Image (tube, rainbow, N blue to C red):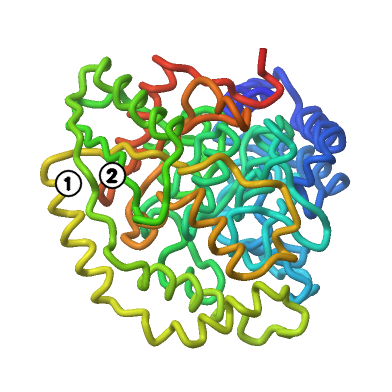
Amino acid sequence: MRTATAVAEDVRSGRVQPAAVAQDALDRIAAGSHLNAFAVVRPDEVLREADAVATRADLAALPLAGVPIAVKDNVPVAGYPMRSGSRATSADPAAADHAVVARLRDAGAVVVGLTTVPELCLWAATDGADGITRNPWNTDLTSGGSSGGAAAAVAGGLVPVAHGNDGLGSIRIPSADCGLVGIKPGRGLVPSDLGANSWFGMAENGPLATTVADAALVLSVMAGDPSLAYVDEPRPLRVGLALGSPSPVVRIDGHFRQAARDTADALAGCGHRVESAELPYPASPVGQLARWTAGAAADAAGLDRSALQKRTRRHVAAGRLGRRLVRPSQIEALERRVTAYFADVDVVVTPMLAQPPIAADRWSEKSWVGNLAANIRYAPFAALWNLLGWPAMSVPMPGTHPVSGTPLAAQIAGPPGSEALLLSVAAQLERDRPWTRTADDRS
């Protein structure tokens, strides 16, 4: 699968027709059906829309001309139900596209289908009544969640890029599971409007891609800021390396800890100053858990509770109680501590995962407590940046975990407005320590 950047250049120049690109994506999706990456595929509409792109008067200026893109099934796409992975949601088609989908289409992208998600996008593994979504690197393991279908589609070489969103790591965790570049932008850069209240402002829309250039290009379209597509060489930076666990009950696999060290070493080799500097993680998980459960309760309001999975009903019930525990003071105190941390560093590197991806299993049939424990044990590093509303991204590292066979990754995060800086740092890493783009590219 060619990159989105290459596809758009070829379509703009006339070397390739959008319909041919779209048909190739449809063929790849059919061949990769065992991954269960898509809830909906749009074969007839895709080809019509691709032909329409070819006749646009502004074709030569379209940043995503003819690029096939997958959209996560928790934002409205006109003409299709937004099911959010649940049989309790409405089967009525959406009347209009979400603002992010409209921007992607305006930029020339062609929506090939809607990707699979866990129910109400609550979990870090993707499965449901319609099947289990699998990791292209090891199909016995999950591709992550909640943007699990998006990650499987890109890492499996079905589409070059995908839309996702991230409320507690739902872009970055699947990206790490599947060896992708995934960025959660800071609050306000990209329209969110996810569910009832975007999980109290924790959730953001963003891209999953195989290269930094593609991630920057798609983010620039989502944000309506063309300058983000141009990734510059960063100035010499102060890099904090934070290897500690966010929770005393979470053990970090040595290979993921080493991936963060390797990332820091690579940045030091690029001329940046790296120092160990542990992050001030929240002392209590109450603020995070309250927003996660109460956000789910808000999203489930008006749904037929009997049609929800048992684990979701339990999560929603906890959220009805947890809403009273959502306090602005929790974020204000955290923000003061982390702002002080960034007085001494420009960006911070952490592990992205604590353990390899969990099994590709019917987690929807397991207990609420079992799901909670599995999610927290393997992917605890993302939540801090959702609580703050600051940008963070998952960046692959060369190589794979010796047991799981899945990619290694590190997280890079920064203060508000640092999206361009994070992308430039990631581009340096990609240049100096390139990774395998998709599972099919393995030697």
**Residue in the image at 30% along x and 44% along y:** 244
Q: For mark 2, what is the residue? A: 414
In depth, the one of 381 and 48 nearer the eye is: 381
Residue 169, numbered circle: none
Q: Report the residue at 75% width, 77% height from top.
A: 88
**In-image side of 33 versus 289 (left or right):** right
- Mark sitting on residue 342: 1
Amino acid at dot 1: Phe
Q: SS for tag 1?
A: loop
Label 1 with label 2: CB-CB less than 8 Å: yes
Relative to 170, does residue 84 appear above or below in the rendering?
below
Q: Residues within 10 Å of mark 2 (few under 14, many from 20)?
A: many
Q: Is residue 299 left or right of residue 192?
A: right
Q: Position of residue 298 (x, y in %)?
A: 54, 81
Q: Secondary structure at mark 2?
A: loop
Q: Nearer the viewer, residue 391 or 356?
A: 356
The number of discs equals 2
Give the quarter of the figure containing the N terminus.
Answer: top right
Q: Spatial distance from mark 1 to mark 2, Cα to Cα?
A: 8 Å
Is 267 above or below relative to 129? above
